Image: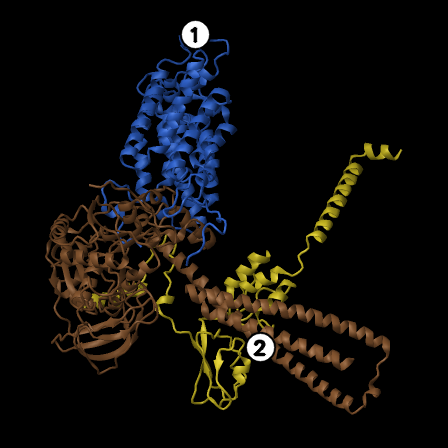
Chain colours: A yellow, B blue, C brown
Amino acid sequence: MLDHLILDNGIVLAILTLAGLSAVFGALLGFAGERFRVDDDPVVEQIDALLPQTQCGQCGYPGCKPYARAISEGDGINKCPPGGDSTIRDLADLLGRDVQPLDGDAETAPRVAYIREEECIGCTKCIQACPVDAILGAARHMHTVIADECTGCDLCIDPCPVDCIDMLPRPRSLEDWQWPFPEGPGKRTPAPGLIATDRSSPAHEAIHG
Amino acid sequence: MSLMHAEQTAIRHPGDSGRLMAWVAIATLPGIITLTWHFGWGVITNILLAILMGWSLEATVMRLRRRPIVATLRDNSALVTAILLGASLPPASPWWLLLVGMIAAIIVAKHLFGGLGHNPFNPAMVGYALLLISFPVPMTQWTAPLGLLSSQAPSLSDIVFHITGLSGTTLPDTWTGATALDAFKNKPETVMASEFWATSPLPEGARTAWYSVSLAWLAGGMLLLYQRIIGWQIPAAMLGSVLLAATVLYAVDPSHHGSPLFHLLGGATLFGAFFIATDPVSAATSRRGKLFYGAGIGLLIMLIRTSGGYPDAVAFAVLLMNFTVPFIDYYTQPRAQGHSRPNHGIKPPPSSNEDRR
Amino acid sequence: MARHFDFPGGIHPPARKQRSAEAPLRSAPLPSRVVLPLQQHIGTPAEPCVSPGQYVRTGERIAIAQGMVSTDIHASISGWVRSIESHPVPHPSGERASCIVIDGDDKDEWQRLPVLNWRQSHHAELIERLRHAGIVGLGGATFPAQIKAAIGEHHRIDSLVVNAAECEPYITTDDVMLRTHADDVVEGARLMAHLCGAERILIGIEDDKPEAINALEASLRASGTDDDAPIALRVIATRYPSGGEKQLIKRLLNREVPSRGLPADIGVLCHNPGTLRAAVQAVREGRPMVSRVVTLTGAAVNRPGNVEARLGSLMCDLLAAAELREAEVSRLIMGGPLMGFELSHTEIPLVKASNCLIAATQDELPTAPPEQPCIRCGACETACPAGLLPQQLYWYARSHDHDKAELFNLFDCIECGACDFVCPSHIPLAQYFRAAKDEIRFRRHEALKAEHARHRFELRQARMEREAAEKEARRQARKAAIRRRSQDQGLSEDSQPTETTDNAANAVMEDDIKTLRIAQAAARAAVKKAEKALARASETGEGDIDDLEVQLATARENLRTTESRLSAAREARENAS
């Protein structure tokens, strides 16, 4: 009676088959998930590797690693101004999420902290604030920034009681210069070195006058 | 960045992509003239209509895509596609047939894939194959080679009347005739090849007409080779494999297979070898890859001609080989200097190629 | 003639060498002011050692090399240092860089280094001399010569290749210089072979330089002792880019420089003839590098030719001496038309890398037409001398798919511009590749920097943790001290915990101590590992030593943290029992 109902009725048969299959595969997946479980979360490391490591805390977390952990637990990927759009893109790629616009103002050029040493009172507050130990100095002696180690995170600005720290654009050398990408089909790519406006006026004058 | 360009300096170099395409267009002239001589003004009307449609379609798409129109038309790719499709269709094809073909070629096969340089398939052949599948009747009715000056040949006004599509899809019986390949394909299994030819199955002068058209395409191809517009690899490999396969088949069973010469000159083989298969965009790029690509087309042509459902097979063979291009390119990647073997764009095992920088 | 081998691809651009090759080598007039960039070589810029107002003589050192890959800079005229300032330099960016400006006194008083006889001097002395004379490769890469000379210490070199192919259009520097100074070049080759221990010397030269070939043959017949390495002159058919280091080695020796490797990896050292001459002058005459031969050519120049000019001379002066028709110049190029770059104006100093200046008219080198879509014609692949697939690289470079571009061997591209030259769609392929390479390098650099910042952050975290752990340990120690004191005084009976809770707490503490012991062992192992990594790095000179030091410090902090925690836990156990 029941077997007739099942065998004669295509839909019931199909549903039962599918249910059976899903039960089998579900069990298999569950077993595999238990058997091959990875204990520590490698995705946090991967996310951390994509973050710029300025340790600036602009994301609202104390450093890049905590933010990486927060992202892996579902926080937004658009809270890192120093990383900017490229980091958001990389994170979106890694996590298979949508690219979101940056939350906050985009960082402009890379910057470096500079202490106006004559104004520094040697309070060591900035030294304690620096996440990468890039400020040297002792109490009641003026402090100075190791420019190469500074990540430009701004964290030393607020603690300074006399406002003697400036964020200056990082000096650029010729080594930092990159060949620009050509502009693509349909465009005439100006030779680098000749800025479009140069081509007509100053360059001409320099050669001709 | 090179501040010196071949086009501006060298003599035997086609230079510009637009000039390259223009040379292809010029090289089709002997073939077109011969076709017209044998098959009448319908060839010219085909091509002219196709060119007009090609330009308008290209301009429309460029307008929709907000790209410069004139600069794009100057690359002459639409012109070449139109000429090739126009020359492949039966003379005096009705306008709607041409339009459907050109839409498939320019819009579907080219621009939907991203425009010139991005199309994986040869646009003209996409148009042709679509028409052949969709409208088999008008597509297989070739005019008889009555000759341009013959009194029986349809007059220009007849042709115009036919192009408008008012006369229906079939040509008047007096005009039509099967192509040599078509006739041979449809010969009854019991009839020997020699008996078949003895019955003179084709309209008078058809074989001569087809052979001379093929030779005219060959002449155009030679011009392209001389001008270094195309490389020798694809035509040579394709013609070589057609000849080889035809010779083997003919040697095994001459009574049911056409002679190698018949396969070489009887259909669109030479046209395909020099004008269709050599389309750089959809062909394989490496030199070795081009040999495989050409040989594959030749073999497919013979396969379809002997055991497939269509009398001629250049379009299908080219399209099928277009599918294989990424695969061919992948396996025929040249070995870069300083590497022991090509790495096919795959990450080598970590030990073998340690980063020295 | 020995058999010649071949590299794939290559092109035959119009040579246009005739106009500048006809004139004999001239000396440029002594400039009244020179501008000497601190970086005229690959590597770290030199550090100035003069101050404004100081009098310097020609050949006097004015900037000192910094680090391994760097070289000294010398005054190229005698006079007073005017300033050390930012000045436009020949660079594709058109940007400025710091330069030493010297106002000349027209006396050209020299200060030379002591004369050496290279056959009798020590290797170390000769290598030091190359460094102090500021010798760099004059073929274009400007690689400091002393490093190449000392390469024999790490690599076994069997062949020295003199790269006189000079394949790029317009440039005739080596051709014309060889006609008059072939003897110096041959002697320089012997000097370099002596230094690197090469058993033979091969001179590769293209067959479009018959006079230079004759001069070389004559000087080969005339010179040399039996001890010297044998020199073979190999004349090869003209084809661009035979003068590429890797291409020439392939052609002369049929050896391929491994990807990302150096010629030294296959026992070859390659030198430009100009470098060899400069090296021999530095040793034999004690003359530092203060001048170089430069080709001045182009249709807008009335007196094309090669001049020996002082470094730092302004290009406008050099071109004026070559009778430049200013109104007709449409583009000014430093280097050749395939690998060079355009200059935005002429108030730019001549540097060690400047081998050629082309003042071209519009007809001569017309502006490139707009880029068209790639039609995959494969012309670039046929032309590529490195056996790459420029059209594939182009797609990946354009879409910034750097991983894929690298897998298609982007970094094997020598940027010769052959693909650009043949591209019917006028795609500036080489520029795409340069841009992609720069972007990849930049990203790699940023990643390293981020990694370093992370390590420093971790060090700080570790330090703070250690401080907290030490504080806790001290607290426990104090507690223990108090307890002992009270025990001594026999007041322990008031702190008798119940049996059950005591046992449970004890078990937990035992567990804690066990975990901490394991952590301590792990931390100790981490310190060992970091120490080893650092030792290896300082031995081989590879890797970022700074960063490894930070990692070692972090590991040490961690070790101290675990130690403090362990001792705190032990004290706590003592306190509890």
Amino acid type shown at disc 1: Glu
> Which residue is the site of mark 1?
B195
Instruction: State left or right for residue C241 relative to residue C213.
Output: right
Residue beneath the point at 36% across and 57% down: C434
Q: Image quadrant of residue A64?
A: bottom right
Mark 1, secondary structure of its residue: helix
Residue beneath the point at 51% across and 66% down: C532
- Report the quarter where the C terminus of chain B lies: bottom left
Task: Measuring from the top left, give residue A155's x and y in whole percent.
Answer: 53, 78
Of B111 and C191, nearer the camera is: C191
> Which residue is the site of mark 2?
C463
Amino acid type shown at disc 2: Arg
Within 10 angstroms of label 2, few (less than 14), some, or many (20 or more) residues?
A: many
Mark 2, secondary structure of its residue: helix
Indicate the chain on which mark 1 is placed: B
Of C284 and B76, nearer the camera is: C284
